[in-house]
Amino acid sequence: IQVTYAFNKWQNLNSRTPSFRFGHGHIYNNYFVSNNDGINTRVGAELLVQNNVFESVKKPLYSTDNGYANASGNDFGGASNTASTTSWSSVGYSYSLTAVGSVKSYVNSNAGAKLSF
């Protein structure tokens, strides 16, 4: 299984934002703010984590039970990436990364449902 999370805002959550327990995950250009835990990779999961912004997140990227991450271009907001590393990077599709310095404003302006009347 492979799951992609892109251009999401994760705010005021305790944990599992998100949590992977096997398979592959691609997590890019997301904004994480005021969460206890960030991305958890475990039970053999391999993640590609790119250009995400973390503010007030105690554990932005971490692994338990043999989870792995290939992380690049992230702003961990002064916290640390403690995930075990992997070289996995073949997501099987093309995509464009937003510069990490623009992620917060882009996600705040575009994530979620938009209502117009």
Image (cartoon, grey):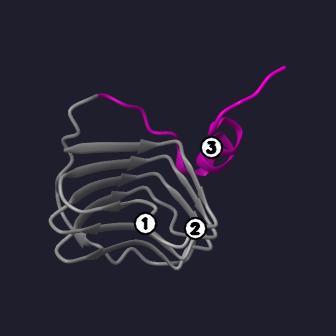
Binning the other alpha carbons within 10 Å of mark 1 as few (below 14), some (14 to 19) or many (20 upward) gives some
Residue 109, horizontal then vertical, whole percent: 71, 38
Who's the residue at 65% across and 33% down the image?
113
Who's the residue at 62% across and 45% down the image?
102
Going by the numbered disc 1, the residue's amino acid type is Arg
Going by the numbered disc 3, the residue's amino acid type is Val
Q: Judge by depth and name the residue closer to the eye, 2 or 50.
A: 2
Say which label, 1 or 3, has the lower sequence index.
1
Binning the other alpha carbons within 10 Å of mark 3 as few (below 14), some (14 to 19) or many (20 upward) gives some
The residue identified by callout 3 is 107
Q: Image check: 16 left or right of 79?
A: left
Going by the numbered disc 2, the residue's amino acid type is Leu
Who's the residue at 23% across and 39% down the image?
91
Residue 77, horizontal then vertical, whole percent: 57, 71
Q: Image check: 77 left or right of 91?
A: right
SS of the residue at dot 3?
helix
The range drawn in magenta is 94-117
The residue identified by callout 2 is 13
Q: Is residue 106 magenta?
A: yes
The residue identified by callout 1 is 16
Asked if labels 2 and 3 touch by Cβ distance under 8 angstroms, the answer is no
Quarter occupied by the N terminus? top left
Q: How far apart are labels 3 and 2 at the CA level?
A: 17 Å
